[in-house]
Image: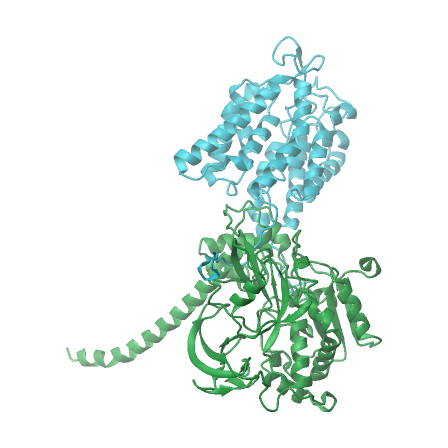
Chain colours: A cyan, B green
Amino acid sequence: MSNAQEKVLLVTTSPHIRGPEDIPRVMWTVVGALAPAGLVGVYLFGYYALFIVILSVLAAVLTEAVIQKYLLGQPVSVKDGSAVITGILLAYILPPGVPWYIPIVGAIFAIAIVKHAFGGLGNNIWNPALAARAFLQVAYPAPINSDWRVLKQGGIFSNITGVDSITQASPLFKEFGGKTYNYTDLLTGNVPGCIGETSAIALILGGLYLIYRGYVDWRVPAGYIATVFILAKFLPAKIEAPWANDPIYHVLAGGLMLGAFFMATDMVTSPLTKKGLLVFGIGCGVLTTLIRFYAAYPEGVCYSILLMNTATPIIDRYTQPRLLGQGKK
Amino acid sequence: MLAGVKELKSFNGGIHPPFDGKSLSKNKEITQAPLPEVAYLYMSQHIGVPAKPVVAKGDVVKKGQKIGEAPALVSAHIHATVAGKVTDITFKPHPVTGARTQVVVIQREGDDEWAPGLDEPQDVEAMSPDDIRNLIREAGTVGLGGAAFPTHVKLSPPKDKKVDAVILNGAECEPYLTCDYRLLMEKTKEVIEGLKIIMKCLGCKNAYVGIEANKPDAYDKVRSAVGEDPHIKVELLEVKYPQGAEHQLIKAILGREFKPTQLPIEAGAVVHNVSTTYAIYEAVKYKRPLIQRVVSITGDGVENPNNLLVRIGTPIEPLLKAARLKEDANKVIYGGPLMGIAQPSIADAVTVKGTGGLLVMRNAGEWQSRACIRCGKCVDACPYGLNPSLLSILCESEHFQQAMEFNLMECKECGCCTYVCTSRRPIVHLIKTAKYELARQKARAQEAQKAKEAQKAQAAPAVTATAPK
């Protein structure tokens, strides 16, 4: 019955096809790549760690939904997975024994202030999870800094906040009493630390998968880790610890792997071009090492990435792509 | 296999969709489409000044008779594509530019007979470059890859520029289209003949044929047609869009770069695609004007994709119906999916010289655009070294001057950025709109300037009149 003359045709400008990649696909893949590190965290620190992750994710997603629906009147985009990532990342950089309200306050701050107050996905200047962590550091210094516990025996049904756990210093604790951990424990994650940062192997696996999928440019983690490695070897150390100038220890301990593969590589807050990404990665490495070596704070990953996020527009300005046929070949 | 034998030539950036649609029509031999009952011939089917009709309503014309005269160098003649009677000279929206354009309407009548003096074998050996150029100009030949730049202009390089390489563009990188591939398969000798005519016309000793590696059979055919000729090199190219664009082809084959707004002559090269080269052969060897071309009718919106030899000015409706248009087809595109022009109506559209494909899509929809998440894929995909992310943001917020500083005008609108965009941003659309706005602002500014001057001239006596006060 249909008559071609009556056919309603869709008229749009070219191109008329789109590639397979879109925001939900990228975001949910990142969620998947983050999973192994989280599983290790839950195994090491018990179900309470999983509880923290879930709280953080729920708070992030709800905050985004409420803001988009009631404050902005926008379509609610929580299904794209980006708020989920923020929730996961925030939980991953919290100590496993934090009080329950910490991830909630942090996630609300991350989504409401760092993300949506600046225009929402794509327009935020800083990585929301890291900025929230920096906020919590100032607002709740006691639970964030002191509570480095691990389970006595391992095993997920134990109680992180109670009798089954012992308090230990983080691997990068600089003062007297800081313990040195061996490489195997640092690789597998059998060390005190934040929920998702301890297992270098799980993080590297997830990160390599993202590089393979093309969502992470190798220049950021490679530039970051290599810079920390080199500087840690040659910078004069003020720290009195056996690992002070041990580059492998510096690379494996603390939040470096999580930061290098999952935080510094946040598309929104890192430079646009490959050249810019290399500069960004190296900058993160320099700042991290300087903070670890010469500042009062044992860990430098969070602030170094936030500072480099701030520098991203100026890096972009000086690393524009080269127009075809212009300048050097 | 082939890829292992020879290194594939390529360029930076570009894309390749997982399904390129070539399989739909690549094995369909070229067949003659039924002649149109009525042919609609736009006076502008090329870049440059529109042709002026040289026939009047009621005139009887023969096939190949000139009906539109090019009034300038950068323009092209238009010929009757069927024998018949001029029933109307009117204005219609152009299928590519959208602008109302003059059209000569010819009702087909009588035998399909050539006008006198045409369709006669010529002695190419005895021709001078100018003879060749004139024949091509007389035939109304234009670039058939889509841009429709008058071919004789491309063959008249400025005296101070040297051409040391002619490139036959057999890349056909736009997904779905197969018209050039079919010509390479079925008219190999003629196309290579055409290439030699171009070389002779330009006095250029070296030529290259660029073919994408997904057409190994065409590569073999061309190799054997070229034979032992040491001056023609056949190159296999990486399968990547826009491999067949002049800048990318020259970069891949010659390793030379030139700015997007510059012409290939800056790199000492002249590029012609397969369909154009075949048209050149027809024009020079047989004095046949450009009245027909191969059109791929393809896409998932037709049941029977095919390659047809279509008279220019043929309404597309019977062509689509013959290819069994599907019920749910809802988008008809002139050209390929990356640079083609969507048509508003099947009933009104007719083919023009640049129409190498009719791509019919079903269940075509629109994409929900989001803010840029700075994934950088567009920067990596842009084959011209632009920053599409930034351009799209500047154009969206109407910061046109700033966009110009970031090379807005160098964009060729190839669509790679928009294809890869994770946020589904309509980058090319924003860039096109910005260019259009800028052109309008410029025109308005010129008008205002003129009006001001006119006012000044008028105001001058008024001032003198009030002076005595």
Q: Position of residue B367 (x, y in %)?
A: 51, 49
**Residue shown at the point (66%, 34%) measured from the top left:** A33
Q: Foreground: B190 or A102?
A: B190
**Residue shown at the point (62%, 33%) measured from the top left:** A31
Camera sees residue B302: yes
Q: Position of residue B182 (x, y in %)?
A: 69, 68
In the picture, measured across the screen, residue B224 lies left or right of residue A6, that is right
Q: Residue B166, relative to residue A243: is it above or below?
A: below
Quarter of the figure with residue B192: bottom right
Q: Position of residue B259 (x, y in %)?
A: 62, 67
Q: Foreground: A163 or B38?
A: B38
In the picture, measured across the screen, residue B99 lies left or right of residue B231, that is left
Q: Foreground: A228 or B377?
A: B377
**Residue shown at the point (65%, 61%) measured from the top left:** B242
- The extreme front residue here reads A1
Q: Residue B5, relative to residue A127: is it above or below?
A: below
Q: Position of residue B72 (x, y in %)?
A: 52, 84
Quarter of the figure with residue A145: top right
Which quadrant is home to the C terminus of chain A? Answer: bottom right
